[in-house]
Amino acid sequence: MRLLLLGLLLFTTLSSNETTTIINDTNNTYNSYENNQITPDLPKVLYLSFEKTPDRVIKGEIFSVTLKTLSTVPSFVDITYELTNHEGLKILNEIPYREEDPKYYHDTFYFLTTSSKAVLPDFTATLHDYNNTVYKDTTLNGKELNVVTLNPKKNFSNIIANSFELLEYKTTSYDEQHNIVVFVATATNCDISAFKLQNVYKQGIESITESHFDSKIVYYVVINKDIQNFSFTYFNLEKNKFLRLNIPIIVNDDSVTTQTDLKPIDQSRQRLKMTIAGIIALVAFIFILWRKKYIYLIFILIPLAYIAYIGVPSKEVCIKVGSSIYLLPVNNGTIFERTSSVYHLQKEGSIKDFVKVKLKNEKIGWVKNEDICKD
């Protein structure tokens, strides 16, 4: 009897364990099925490849990369990109410049090389359709680039471009030891804000228009008076070599219509001119007394009129408190002084929206018309 009860108990235990195992297996199978239903595999509809990448890049160069993208969805709204994991590069456009053909998108991105080691970003493309259907993102992994670092001479301007051209330039006197050269230049495929020269007394950007396609800069540089020809180089990407640009130093005294008239009036020259005119008038007067022909009075009147014209003192202008005095007559230009009180300064000339003034320390500056006191 005891053996019969022991056997029945053993049978019941085994049956219970088997049932539990079956239930657990069934639950696992259900859970696995349910999970697959919640996170099904998304279809891949985009295929990316590199269509154009550079064989080498120069540190400081702007270059382009073009992707060729194919979609298996015939009609959709757009393809967008996320760029990640790049190294030694500055991304200039995260929205590509796009060209289409019946089969592919040709999407172009621009980069600036900032380091001697550079890696392209991973390009992750996402397709957006009209029904907000979710598709699988496609990622094209970036690759390391062959970067070359230039070893230029000291007159290198730090410019790497397809082209860099001087449009105009002018040299005027800055002080007794220096001249100031102002020039306007344009460039293509260039980080023009990188422009910088070595071994000069002073330099700076007066205005700039930045674009990796076409850019423009107004730049000033203060150099020693003994320099007769000012030159610098840039690296031309199309010719793959350094090119030299020259600016002949011809100090200009006249009033100009550009933004570079910094020449102060030379009082010693004016005194010399007045002396010569006075001598001419005196000689003419003696000649009249000797010949007694008063028709020659004109030779006295003209020099005297010239002396009177030069001798008229320059008009003073009133400058408001807190006004900016600029190095050059350019909006957003270099400010080298602000008026701490109302200034009464000698007016030396004017150009468009600016008045040229001479400060108490004999420096020449420019003040906006709006900062001149009203009568």
Image: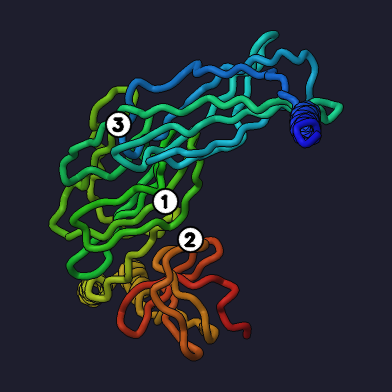
The answer for how far apart the CA atoms under marks 3 and 1 are is 30 Å
Residue at the spot of label 3: 147
Q: Residues within 10 Å of mark 1 (few under 14, many from 20)?
A: many
Quarter of the image that includes the C terminus: bottom right
Q: Of all residues shown, which one is farthest toward the bottom?
A: 341
Q: Which is nearer the N-term, disc 3 or disc 2? A: 3
Name the residue type under label 2: Val
Name the residue type under label 1: Val
For image coordinates 46% across by 28% down, the residue present is: 142
In terms of depth relative to the viewer, which is nearer, 136 or 9? 9
- Verify CB contact (< 8 Å) between mark 3 and mark 1: no
Name the residue type under label 3: Val
Residue at the spot of label 2: 330
Quarter of the image that includes the N terminus: top right
Residue at the spot of label 1: 218
For image coordinates 34% across by 85% down, the residue present is: 360
Q: Is residue 356 above or below residue 143?
A: below
- Verify CB contact (< 8 Å) between mark 1 and mark 2: yes
